[in-house]
Amino acid sequence: MAAAELPRLGLGIGWRAEIDLTVERLPGVEFVEVVAEHIRPARLPESLRVLRGRGVPVVPHGVGLGVGGAEPPSPARLSHLAECALALDSPLVSEHLAFVRAGGVEAGHLLPVPRTREALDVVTENVRRAQDALPVPLALENVAALFGWPDDELTDAEFLAELVERTGVLLLVDVANLYTNQVNLGLSAVEALDRLPLSRLAYVHVAGGEEHGGLWHDTHTATVPEAILDVLAELCARAAPPGVLLEWDDAYPSDAALAAELSRVAAAMTRIPS
């Protein structure tokens, strides 16, 4: 899919069962994203059917495929993602570039991939397998990290850029995760933006978090700090993202507070970086 063919998604929010009615009535919501592992394609939640009936695009977002592992992606997990995309008539699906399991043992977290040439070869093959199994384009998301592997040969942005060049995969750039890696690992978010192939940008994630003991935790349970909106503004100064989506996963605020957050996100998209 060429950059000019990427679907325009607009301003979005993560659909969660706990706020389904809120999402339906929030003003300005142009698309939503649903965690693929939380739905059954044969019995979609009524709220998602309502949104689709209005013409609102719904993007399945996987959290457990594990394309960053040494083992090939599970055919069953790939089949589920494909069925979600078909049931929702989705323009694309997204997943994390993360390590999630090995030998049947679940990590319990989206762990960073060792950024080595050897790992890049393995991930490239895993991504190609996933692309072959999916009926729509795949976008991969950069993850937040609390640590880096000692033998890394590439930065996260360099790893992603080469993976895009090899596979043509789309990017889901999470600016909150870029900020997390800046705080926790000293990796400049702006430098990452300058190295990422933003011409392959499918959409963007933005979310709030919390600082504990000098580390930033990407919790998706708090208002988005200005520092993360600044990263979003930097991205939008470099490329026009097809979509920008607010994630909020727990400790849900009022409808008015969520509407205000969406307004802050929209404003940051047109802000001139200082």
Image (cartoon, rainbow, N blue to C red):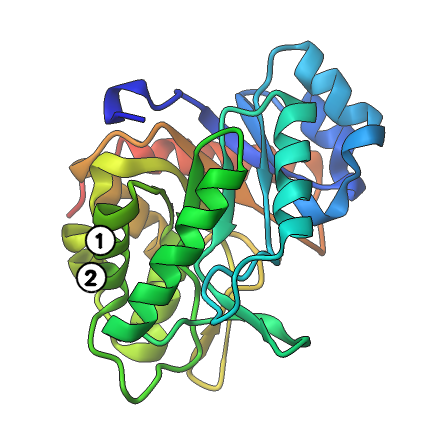
Q: Is residue 36 above or below residue 53?
A: below
Q: CA distance from mark 1 to mark 2?
A: 5 Å
| Of 46 and 153, the residue lying toward us | 153
What residue sits 38% from the left and 62% below the top? 123
Whether label 1 touches label 2, CB < 8 Å:
yes
Mark linked to residue 125: none
Task: Return the x and y of residue 139 as percentages of the image width and height.
Answer: 42, 42
The residue type indicated by label 1 comes to Ala
Q: Which residue is denoted by mark 1 in the rendering? A: 161
Task: Return the x and y of residue 141 as percentages of the image width and height.
Answer: 42, 52
SS state under label 1: helix
Asked whether residue 35 is in view, the answer is: no
Q: Is residue 42 above or below residue 180?
A: above
**Taking 206 as reference, is 219 left or right?**
right
The residue type indicated by label 2 comes to Glu
Q: Is residue 242 above or below residue 189?
A: above
What residue sits 34% from the left and 24% below the top? 6
Mark linked to residue 158: 2
**Taking 42 as reference, is 200 left or right?**
left
